[in-house]
Amino acid sequence: MLDIKFIRENPELIKEASRKKHLAFSVDELIVADAKRLEKLSLVENLRSEQNLVSDKIPKSTPEERQALIAQMTLLKEDLKKHEEELKVIVSEWQKLMLRVPNVPDISVPEGESDEQNMEVREWGEKPIFDFPVRDQMELAEMNDLVDFERGVKVSGFRGYFLKNEAALMSMALWQLFNERLVAKGFTPMIVPSLVTQKTLIGTGYLPGGEEDLYRTQDDMYFAGTGEVATMSYYGDEILEQSQLPIKIAAFSPCFRREAGAHSKDTRGLVRMHEFMKLEQVVLCEASHATSVELHEQITANVEEVLQELGLHYHVVANCGGDLGQGQVKKYDIEVWMPSQQKYRETHSASYFHDYQARRLNIRYRDADGKLRFVHSLNNTAVATPRILACIWEQYQQADGSIKVPKVLQKYVGKETINRIQ
């Protein structure tokens, strides 16, 4: 959510944000609704003031005057009630429009309609070259008894799976590895809820707009698709001190996504699952664009450093306008190379929002001058499993179908090579 004063003063910026993000939003409709809201609010406030004046006169009036004032008060109450009800309707429509206002993307965000137009920023390492026919994640998993899809579907339906043996050990190893690196950089480790309220999802910007990808319970609770949702709401409606910032949290949680829409076609293997585990970086900082930019680079580097420890070939792309969410100012995707597909697959996303989420969640801090300001927020995947397992297995596969364990994970997995070939 943006400041309505900023929107009124900069309608062309909002129009440009809608164009660049390829979102259907009419800022003119919002400005008309806002003017209607302010007009009705002014009328209601004037009626309340008039009612108070009449109320103050009644105790001091003569019996004859009192009857007239009481009659006047009755009419005022009826009129006020009617306009208050109308104001509720007008405010409700205004709020719906406010929740759809796109955040203004950074000037460095490239043009484009979809992830096909994302721009490569850098790459690391060399693409692995094999002198034998490359196997894909599915074949490697089956050969080494790492995943059971058949029983997974039996138990939890489409996209269900069981991770087994070294796949389970490697998942836990990755959680521990990334968590250790983040804690060493000052992140507070948390295990956060996956079951959240509608208000929490609205606060982080996943509602309205993301309904088709969310699992909803019968009592109007939701299963979150990322730990960012619960973690951002941790400080909702609170006032922080500037000395507390930046706040850095490593949030671990199960995540749930319906993977509807454009992602529904990507059904094979471990890349897009309905249920997965994720360690998420969430950062709150002072209301400074320069600080947000600096921290955005830092949280991206935090992941890159560990991917390099894992020896995985990857690249970083800057997401184009059409591949940004409504609230994001800028976003990087880290994509790891998948040899069987001969292309990169997204494994991490790093975004910053300025005060877009903080306004929705009412998270403020007191600056050095004692002024209350909304914090800026950022988030980035630290690691999501089992998706990254598919990339590791394919890049570390051997001619006989066995899989080398990256050196940094060997102490957790307890072996150098996975060789359960069946």
Image (tube, helix red, strand yellow):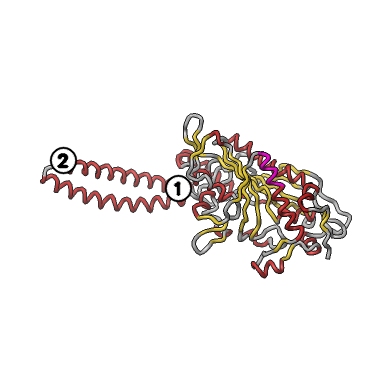
Mark 1 Cα shell of 10 Å, populated few (<14), some (14-19), many (≥20): many
Query: Bounds of the magenta span?
Result: 177-185
Disc with the residue nearer the chain's start (2 vs 1): 1
The answer to whether residue 150 is above or below residue 310 is below
Residue 30: image tag: 1
Q: Does the stretch in magenta take in 350?
A: no
The percent coordinates of residue 389 (x first, y second) are 74, 55
What secondary structure is found at the residue carrying circle 2? helix
Q: Amino acid at mark 2?
A: Lys
Mark 2 Cα shell of 10 Å, populated few (<14), some (14-19), many (≥20): few
- Distance in Å between CA atoms under marks 2 and 1: 46 Å
Q: Residue at x 29, y 53 (%)?
A: 82
Between 162 and 62, the residue placed more toward the observer is 162
Residue 60: image tag: 2
Magenta stretch, main secondary structure, is helix
Q: In the picture provided, is 406 more to the left or to the right than 121?
A: right
Q: Nearer the viewer, mark 2 or mark 1?
A: 2
Q: Residue furthest bottom?
A: 154
The percent coordinates of residue 346 (x first, y second) are 70, 51
The percent coordinates of residue 68 (x first, y second) are 15, 47
What secondary structure is found at the residue carrying circle 1? helix
Examine the rendering and report whether any part of residue 351 can be seen: no
Q: Amino acid at mark 1?
A: Leu
| Rendered-image quadrant of the C terminus | bottom right
Q: In the picture provided, is 346 more to the left or to the right than 81?
A: right
Q: Residue furthest top?
A: 369
The percent coordinates of residue 319 (x first, y second) are 65, 46
| Mark 2 touches mark 1? (CB < 8 Å) | no
